[in-house]
Amino acid sequence: MKFSIFKQLFQRSWIVALLGLLVVVALNGCNPSQFKTQAAQVPQLVIATGSNPQTFNAALNQTTPNIFNFTYEPLAALNGVTKKIEPALAQSWEISEDKLRYVFTLREGLKWSDGKPLTADDVVFSFNDIYMNKRIPTYSQDNLRIGISKAFPKVRKLDNRRVEFVMPEPYVPFLALVAAELAILPEHALRQAVETNRADGRPVFFSTWGIDTDPKKIIVNGPYTLETYAPSQRLVFRRNPYYWRKDAQGNQQPYIERVVWQIVENGDTSLMQFRSGGLDILEVGPGTFQLLKREEKRGNFSIQNAGPDTGTSFIAFNLNKGRRNGKPLVDPIKSRWFNNVAFRQAVAYAIDRRTIINNQLRGLGETQDSPVFAPSPYYLSPKQGLKAYEYNPEKAKQLLLGAGFKYDSKGQLLDSDGHQVRYTMLAPASNRPSVPPMIKQNLSKIGITVDLQYVDFSVQGDKISNTLDWESYLGGMSGSIEPHDGYNVWTVEGSFHVFNQKPQKGQPPIEGWEASDWEKKIEDLFIAGAREFDEAKRKAIYNETQRLAQEYVPFVHLVNTLALVAVRNTIQGVKYSAVLTSPRGYAWNIYELKEVDKK
């Protein structure tokens, strides 16, 4: 899963994008007017992003949005409308009766952007030498470690077009989280980098295809090649002449020759550029919806509403009881509060999420009560029996009193030993004027004092993933409609089991770390759900994970925005989807987009 604590820190899988969820516009741009008139005879799409790419190496990517939706394809792909897995580089696949063996057959005549053949050797190389290479640890490995044994599948070539994957046990999410997510990479361009070491002993692959690489040297298999990159200005993509897709009439896809991706960090600037006609597509936030809605006809664009997004904002507490070098990661007094289930439930009841939606999201959102996102067929709603924490400060106070807390004469909350309940909550600096102060005010009504600490994205990411010396933080997550996409959050040794994180490879050890029974139970259920092919039974398993998550509230879920995008009427074919994160929400079928004559 993508942790959107903000969509630029973490990526796959429940991985990450520092949360513009509670703010305004998601995509930004720079001065694109020249591109809307230059080479007018060339069909082109001008869009925007709020940050520079972090890498041109798809296997090492940990951020979203990124360029790889334009440049690479996996074996299969998720249809953003039907929510079904469809063929991509593989024209078909077969699953054995015992559900342990998958055989993928590649399309005939596939080529890389340099014209060289794309074969089964590239698929085997991508998995055996990159994605399952223990010397190249990536977030993708969480979804490739299967079942209780956490063993990798065995991958081998059957012939030039067929590849066999053998699972250690039945694994339902394989198509959604592996075949449809992991880009196939070129063996002829990358094998030497994988097999050669740098001076520090790590593979040269770690420094291959960084953002300082000449874009023309990046070998791809997707609809577009990367033509130029000007840092903090723009990326320009050019149609890949060797891309495999053709329409029903035999016409080469994609139809649009060039994509210009402007880089501007200021949302107001991108809004201005879209309104003036400089951008073709703009993801719309609550702060801009009403303005743009009034301008649809005059501005020659339409707003698409894809419904609730695959994301949520949340408050998390550090439940880690471990020590580093003899020093507790969390003050033992505060750790006792955080590890008290009644305390976490009280905080959940104390947050006025409806007001957050009305005031900050302008009504364009919904409460989120589950770690499974609303668009997923596995989502268990409060109407279906999931525990929900509707705003109820009096109930919160009763829970605290029942757990041994008490109030002084000033209404401040004290624990049973008389310590004032006061702690620090990390919040993204970009969120300063909005939600954090509301949360602080809400919690003050039940006697809790919260000290807000606004930090940069990278600082917050380092604390919650590396140093682990934090108390509480405001974050977000985004991901897939496949619930197992959250496995790296819910397995106790997961790379983003953030509320009780074990040290990852290369990090200093932790003494005294322990997992609670409910954490182990959720992990067991995820393992069971991943091997259950009976759909009704599988839904029942994930229903139970949601019940446990809401009962023990390691995440106090807050709100979820509606997925909205404004599309210029000169661009046809956009089927905006809430089940795919930006920019895939509008780029998942980019090969079908057309630019029509401007009136």
Image (cartoon, rainbow, N blue to C red):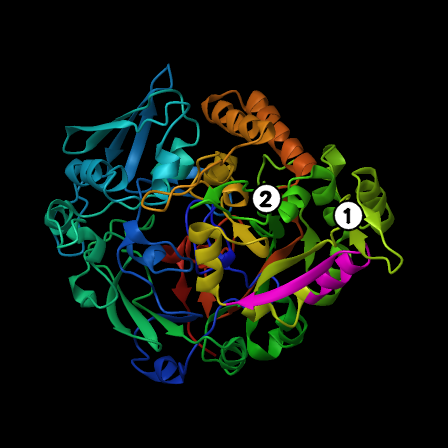
Q: Nearer the viewer, residue 402 or 216?
A: 402
| Left or right of 495, for residue 364 | right
Residue situated furthest top in the rendering: 98
Spatial CA distance of label 2 from label 1 is 20 Å
Write down the quadrant of residue 232 in the picture.
Answer: bottom left
The residue tagged 1 is 349
* The disc label shown at residue 531, or none: none
| Left or right of 302, for residue 589 | left
Write down the quadrant of residue 324 in the picture.
Answer: top left
Label 2 Cα crowd, 10 Å radius (few <14 / some 14-19 / many 20+) = many
The residue tagged 2 is 373
| Left or right of 138, for residue 534 | right
Query: Which residues are drawn in magenta?
Result: 437-455
- For marks 2 and 1, the one nearer the N-term is 1
Q: Is residue 284 visible?
A: no
> Looking at the image, which residue is at 70% across and 44% down?
344
Q: Is residue 70 visible?
A: yes
| Left or right of 81, for residue 337 | right
Q: Nearer the viewer, residue 576 or 151?
A: 151
> Looking at the image, which residue is at 19% across and 54% down?
242
Label 1 Cα crowd, 10 Å radius (few <14 / some 14-19 / many 20+) = many
Membership of 445 in magenta stretch: yes
**Amino acid, disc 2:** Phe
Q: Element under label 2?
A: loop
Write down the quadrant of residue 71 in the picture.
Answer: bottom left
**Amino acid, disc 1:** Tyr
